[in-house]
Image: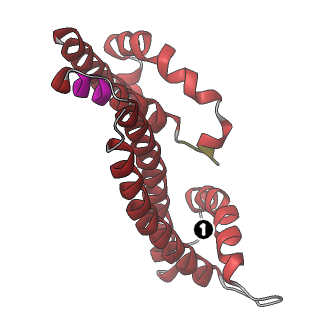
């Protein structure tokens, strides 16, 4: 079982390296340094694999790093569990996979809620011009009006602020209900006898 402990530790270390690589991409002077190039050589082949999934892009925002890190964490957890219990259970693997998937979705919803709140506060403060807000609006508005449109009656006008408030509330509810449902599913899966 020491092999699984070592594998879990190695994957956790690689996860941390990938996280550092993500942070480096936000700081151009570090990203183009020798250390940045070294980290890119180690992490980019794995992380770039997830860039091809278009559903992970929301306008100018790319969520593929979250999926790549989430998958590493899930695999590390599976290996840690094998090292700890001495057995490989299908139920635990399914539970880890479902848990990881919900964790990624919940993170995306949480990030979206934060962006919506920032934009809503800016709208209430009268901030609306500029390329940053335009870029943010072009990313958020398709989602906002799709979600808010579910709650809008026919031919009813809805202000941007109202649409943002409705969307924030709807996403909070989805996240809350999803957390409850997925915790029940994970508990059921871990209880499987095989």
**Residue under the image location 45 percent in, 64 percent down:** 175
**Which residue is labeled 1 in the image?**
129
Please tell me whether residue 123 belongs to the stretch shown in magenta.
no
Q: In front: 43, or 76?
A: 76
Vertical arrangement, residue 109 with respect to residue 32, above or below: below
Quadrant in which the N terminus is drawn: top left
Q: In front: 38, or 19?
A: 19
**Residue under the image location 21 percent in, 18 percent down:** 9
The answer to whether residue 51 of the structure is visible from this angle is: yes
Quadrant in which the C terminus is drawn: top left
Vertical arrangement, residue 128 with respect to residue 162, above or below: above
Q: Position of residue 159 (x, y in %)?
A: 66, 85
**Residue under the image location 61 percent in, 42 percent down:** 57
Residue positioned most to the right: 155
The segment highlighted magenta reads 76-82
The residue carrying pointer 1 sits among few (fewer than 14), some (14 to 19) or many (20 or more) residues within 10 Å by Cα, namely few
């Amino acid at each position: 079982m020491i092999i699984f402990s070592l594998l879990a530790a190695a994957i956790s270390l690689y996860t941390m390296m990938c996280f550092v690589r993500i942070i480096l991409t936000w700081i151009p002077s570090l990203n183009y340094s020798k250390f940045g190039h070294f980290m890119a050589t180690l992490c980019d082949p794995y992380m770039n694999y997830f860039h091809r999934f278009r559903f992970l892009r929301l306008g100018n925002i790319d969520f593929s790093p979250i999926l790549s890190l989430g998958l590493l964490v899930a695999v590390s957890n599976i290996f840690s569990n094998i090292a700890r219990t001495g057995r490989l259970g299908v139920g635990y693997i399914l539970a880890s996979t479902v848990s990881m998937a919900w964790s990624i979705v919940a993170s995306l919803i949480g990030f979206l809620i934060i962006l919506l709140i920032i934009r809503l506060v800016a709208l209430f403060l009268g901030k609306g011009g500029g390329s940053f807000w335009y870029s943010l609006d072009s990313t958020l508005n398709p989602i906002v009006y799709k979600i808010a449109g579910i709650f809008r009656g026919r031919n009813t006008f809805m202000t941007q602020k109202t649409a943002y408030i409705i969307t924030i509330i709807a996403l909070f509810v989805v996240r809350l209900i999803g957390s409850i449902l997925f915790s029940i599913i994970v508990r059921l899966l871990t209880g499987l006898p095989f």
